Image (spheres, grey):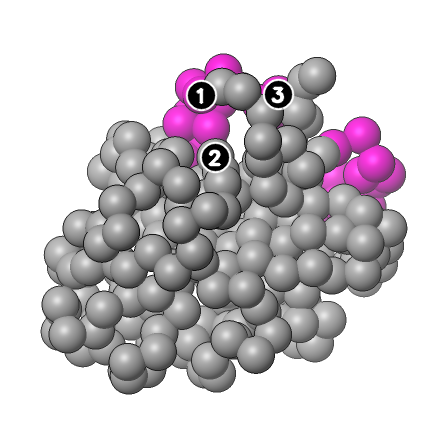
Amino acid sequence: MTVRLLVYTRTADYRHDSIPDAVAALRGTGEYAVEHTEDPAALEAPLDGYAAVVFLSTSGDVLTPAGRDRLAGYVESGGGFVGVHAAACTEENWPYYGELLGARFARHPAIQPGKAVVEDRDHPATRPLPAVWDVTDEWYDFRTNPRDRVHVLVTADESSYDGGGMGPDHPLAWCRAQGAGRVFYTALGHTAEAWRDPGFLAHLRGGIDWATGTGDRER
């Protein structure tokens, strides 16, 4: 079965230089049929043919009112949604989107190495990872801790880097249900180097596979 993804990278605020590397990496896995767009009209059209919609480092208001309605209807009726990194800095004026994703970006310290701790070792997004994962990235803080609204997969060990602002319970990647749909989010993926890192790519592929309902397929 071909897993079709709509990968959306429109930005109306900060734009990540790593976006071309990210799109190329998803295509390079050979596991997905990737349709990449930055055209809001693509989100106004029927989405039923996609296994998941991926907001990849989107920023700002990137949807039309019709696109908002289409995306919400798609997820509520069983579609998959995947948010990567700056997806948490997106659609600030649409309350539903904050609920869908689980949390909104607040701030981050400088890019630096740190440790991510795997909380759920059995999820497709975390099975390939070590229990403590050494990562160099932009460590997002969120405005609220999403733990009571999501299933936390990975947390940040703030003692391993400088400038963390959430304390000892700092979710970094999670999943949740929204209506009949599945939502996966990872805060990682800021740098171009991340998109060449086998660990990060395995993490993201597992999240995509969970969101699309193909999480137990053989690779």
Q: Does residue 135 appear left or right of residue 10 in this picture?
A: left
Q: Does residue 148 appear left or right of residue 39 in this picture?
A: left
Q: Is residue 83 above or below residue 91?
A: above
Q: Which residue is mark 1?
A: 29
Q: Which residue is mark 3?
A: 33
**Identity of the residue drawn at 35% across and 74% down:** 170
Looking at the rendered structure, the secondary structure element under dot 2 is: helix
Mark 2–mark 3 Cα distance, whole angstroms, equals: 13 Å
| Extreme residue toward the front, this view | 122
Looking at the rendered structure, the secondary structure element under dot 3 is: strand
State which mark lies toward you, 2 or 3: 2
Q: Which mark is residue 95?
A: none
Specify the segment rendered in magenta: 22-50
Q: Does residue 155 appear left or right of residue 174 in this picture?
A: left
Q: Does residue 157 appear left or right of residue 174 in this picture?
A: left
Q: Earlier in the sequence, mark 2 or mark 1?
A: 1
Image quarter where the N terminus lies is top right
Amino acid on which the number 2 mark rests in the picture: Arg
Q: Residues within 10 Å of mark 2 (few under 14, many from 20)?
A: many
